[in-house]
Amino acid sequence: MQLPFALAEEPDAQTREAGRKLFAGEVDFLKGVVAMSGLPADDRIEVCFAGRSNVGKSTLINAVTGRKAIARASNTPGRTQEINYFTLGDARYLVDLPGYGYANAPLHVVEKWQALLKQYLSGRAGLRRAFVLVDARHGIKPVDQEIMTLLDKSAVTFQVVLTKADKIKASQRDGVLQQVRGKLAQHPAAYPELVLTSSEKGDGIATLRSIIAGIT
């Protein structure tokens, strides 16, 4: 029997090559946006990455794009306060959303980020999928549930990507996956497949590239 929210399978040779070619092409930083008026034209397929401010989002984006510093990894979680747009060739955008779970951010800053995020998620016709990053060591936390509920309400399909898989023992992994699957069952917008990644080891990177390349 197929598990709900099974782990994504390794791509076949053709699908893997499509993912490789997409990210071997032009990948460029376009702009950072702090208000809806600054968003680029909604004229192409768009995927976004969301995650807690210490989940390793910038590191994963760097690994997926094959660029060492295209997304600014910071030792200060939550520093990225903009919606950052990157172009994937001439037909796709990759979007880096501000980290949430802002432990040290002032309340007015948090409220501004949240308002922008809600407007963005409900207002982009080209947005095909959100990738919600979850630390494989900790599973889904209440702050992750909040963003998932927002995605449900915005009718944006989201797929969970587990990060830092190399930091968890194999004996602990099943328990985390069980917790994640149980939480995702509560969310109608959740895509029924998980991606397990390690930016450090390269695990799951080809799979994630292939998934993005296959979104139409």
Image: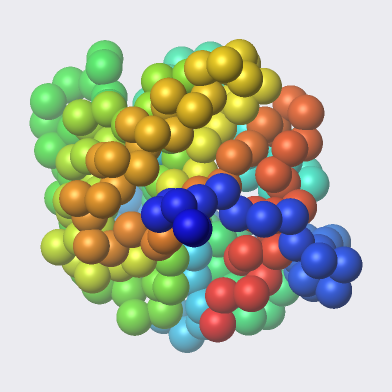
Q: Residue at x 44, y 34 (%)?
A: 177
Q: Residue at x 73, y 37 (%)?
A: 203
Q: Residue at x 55, y 61 (%)?
A: 94
The x, y position of residue 50, in whole percent, is: 41, 45
> Along the line of sight, which residue is nearer the eye, 211 or 107?
211
- Is residue 153 left or right of 99 when viewed as pictured? left
- Is residue 89 left or right of 59 when viewed as pictured? right
User: Can residue 148 be seen here?
Assistant: yes
Q: Residue at x 61, y 27 (%)?
A: 165
Rendered-image quadrant of the C terminus: bottom right
User: Can residue 65 be seen here?
Assistant: no
The x, y position of residue 141, in whole percent, is: 27, 27
The x, y position of residue 167, in whole percent, is: 61, 16
The x, y position of residue 98, in whole percent, is: 37, 41
Where is residue 128, by image quadrant? bottom left
Q: Is the residue 126 above or below the residue 163 in the image?
A: below
> Which colouring convention does the figure follow?
rainbow
